[in-house]
Amino acid sequence: MKTILYILQKEFRQIFREKAMLVIILVIPMVQLLILSFTATFEIKNTNISILDHDHSVESRNLINKFSGSPFFTISSFYDSYDKGVEALKSGKTHQLLIIQPHFEKDLQRDGKGKVMIITDAINGSAASIMSAYAHSILFDFNKQILIEHYPNLSLSDPIQITVSNWYNPRLNYITYMVPGILVLLVTIIGMFLSGMNVVKEKELGTIEQINVTPIKKYQFIIGKLLPFWIIAMFEFSFGLFLARFVFGVPMLGSLALQLGTVSVYLVVVLSFGLFVSTITETMQQAMFISWFFMVIFILMSGLFTPVESMPDWAQTVNKLNPISYFIQINRMIMLKGSVFSDFTRQFYSLVVYAVLMLSLSVWRYRKVA
Amino acid sequence: MSNGAVILQNISKSYKTVKALTEINVSIAKGELFGFIGPDGAGKTTLFRILTTLLNPDSGTATVEGFDTVKNYKSIRNIAGYMPGRFSLYQDLTVEENLSFFASIYNTTIEENYHLIADIYKHIEPFKHRKAGKLSGGMKQKLALSCALIHKPEVLFLDEPTTGVDAVSRMEFWEMLKKLRSQGITILVSTPYMDEAALCDRVALMQNGHVMTIDTPNAIINAFPVKIYAVRSNRMFHLLNDLQSIPETEAVYRFGDVVHYLSHSKTFDPLSITRHLDSLSHTEITVNQSVPTIEDSFMLYMRKSDKFNISQHDN
C-alpha cells in the first residue's frame, strides 16, 4: 500500500512539474467543451435560396415573399436563367434553387395547378432533407392559402389533429443534447491518451527498465499509473458538469452522485484501454496512432452526432464494444431525463464487464520480463 | 563453485536470427569485482539483462546469490542493484526525488543507507534540487550508482557505467567501485574499455556472444604466448601492409600510435623487421619490445576464434 503511495507521489510530481502538460490536461478540454458545444450543431438556421422566377406575376411574388419571410431562408439572389442558377449551386453560393415555371399564375387560375421546382444541394444528406422539409412546409402553407382564397367555403380542418410535444428537451435545444455527449468525449480523450502515453514514455526513455528490476509488483505499478489520471479525469468531468450547468444551462435532472458513480466506472474502462495500448506498443508514436484509430471509430459510432438506432444492424452489433456509446447514453439519460439506476442497468453492467476485461487484459499483457 | 555469488551455466540467448549469447559458463565469487570486457555487440548487455531478471535465457540456468533468475526472480529483485547502460532515471525529477523514490520502493530511506552511498552522493548532494536531466554525464552516473545502491544490494550490476564519461570521472568511478567491494558487495561490471580490465579482480573477455577466456588480468597477460614488438616508421600509413608481408608474421594491428607486431616463430629476430622495412624504403624505424596488455590478449583471442570460425566454415 505504501509503495502505491510513493508511486502516486512520483506521478503527480511529474505531471504537475510539466507546466505545458498541465495546460493541456486542464485548459484545453474546457476550451474544447466551450467551442464544440456552440458550434457542433445540426440545426440549420440559415439556408441560402436562389430564385428563378420565370413568371413574374403576383402569385409568384407572393410565393417568394413566403420564403423571404421565413427566418429559415435567406434569398441570396435572383437569376434569369437555369444555367446561372445551377452555376451558383455548383459554386456553393446557394443551397437551394426555387424555380417558378412560366405561366405559373395563369395555370393556377385556369387549371388550378401551378408548377414550381426545388433543387437542393444534397452533399450533406441530413442537412438536405431538413432544407427540403422546410421548403415543403412553406409550399404547403402557400397551397393552403390559395385554397382558402379560391374556395372560402371549403372546410379545411384535418380529420386527425396532431399535437406534438417534445419531452426532455422541450425547446429542441441542440446544446442541451450535445453538451453531455461532448463532456464524455473529453474525459475519454484525457483518460485514453494520458494513461497510455505515460507508460510508453517510460518505455521510450528506458526508465521502465530501472522500475522493472525493483520489487514493485505489477498491480502496484498499474494502480500507480491509472489512479492519477483517474483523479484528473474525475476532476475534469466535475468541472465540465459545472460549466454545463452554469454556462450552458443544461438541466441536471438526475442524481449527481449516480452520475459521478457511473463515470468512475467508465473511466476505468478508458484508462485500462489506454494502458492496454501501451503494453502492445513500443513508442509514443505507435501508441498515439493506435489510440487514435480506436478513438475515431468509437466517437463516430458513439451516437454523439447521429443516433445509434439509425445505423445498420452490423454497426449496432459492433457498437456493443464501444464504451463511449454506452456512457453517452447513460450520461444523457441521467442529465436530461433524470433516469435512475434501474433505467440503464444494461449499459452500466456492460461497462462493468468491459472495465474488468480491459483491466485484466492489460495487467496480463504488462510484463516485467521480456 | 556452488557457493558463488553469481553462477551462469550454459546460458544461450538468440534474438530471431542473431545468436547474442552462446553457452556462457561463468562463476563469480562473493565480494568479487568482476569485469565483462568486450566490444559493442559482444553480448554484455544481454547477459546483464538475464542476470537482472529482465530477460529469460533460451537455455541454461543462472543464479544470483543462489536464486534462479527465472524461478526466483522476485527474490533477486530485492537483492540486486542494476545500473543500465542508458541513463534510466527520471530526468524531470530532482536528484533527491529520484533517490528517495528508489529508496522508498525498496522500503528503505536515504537516511538508513546513507553510509553506503555517502562517498558517491556527497559529490552530487550540492545539486540535489537540480533535475536529473540537467546533470553532467559524470554526475548522472554518480546519481545512477547511488540509486542502484540505496537499497543495500548484495550484488551490483553495472552495464557499461563508464561509457561516455570523461577520463577523470572514469578513474574516480573505479575508485568508488573498489571502496564498495571492500564493503563486501559483489560487483559485476561490463565495459568496452580494455584498460579498465586491469582494475577488476577477474575478467571475462567476450566477443560475438562467446566468452573467450576468464582469469585475473595478470594471469591473462602472463599467459601471452609470444613477444610483442611496437613498431614505428616515417610511413605509418603503409606500415601495416608492409609488416604483413614478413613471412613469420602471426598478427599485425594498430595499437594507439604504434603498430604491434607478433610473430609465430619462436626464434624470431626483431632485427629482421628493421631489415624488411628498410628494404621497403621506410626510414626513422623504431622497434621496441612491448609488455603485453589485455588489449593484446584480446586481439590474439579474437584472431583465434576468427580462425576457428573460418575453419568451421570450410568444413
Image (cartoon, grey):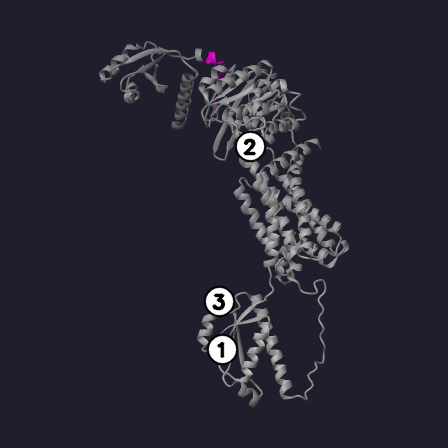
The label number, if any, that marks residue A92 in the structure image: 3
- In this view, A271 is above or below A183: above
Measure the alpha-carbon separation of dots 1 and 3.
16 Å
User: Splitting the image into 4 quarters, where does residue B94 fall?
Assistant: top right
Chain ID for label 1? A
Q: Quadrant of the C terminus of chain A?
A: top right
Q: Quadrant of residue B128?
A: top right
Question: Is residue A276 shown to the viewer in this render?
Answer: no
> Element at badge 1?
strand
Q: Residues within 10 Å of mark 3 (few under 14, many from 20)?
A: few
Q: Give B259 or A165, whichever is nearer the viewer.
A: A165
Q: Position of residue B102 (x, y in %)?
A: 62, 28
- Secondary structure under tag 2 reads loop
Instruction: Classify 10 Å Cα crowding around label 1: few (below 14), some (14-19), many (20 and above).
Output: many
For disc 1, the marked residue is A52
Q: Residue at x 74, y 51 (%)?
A: A256
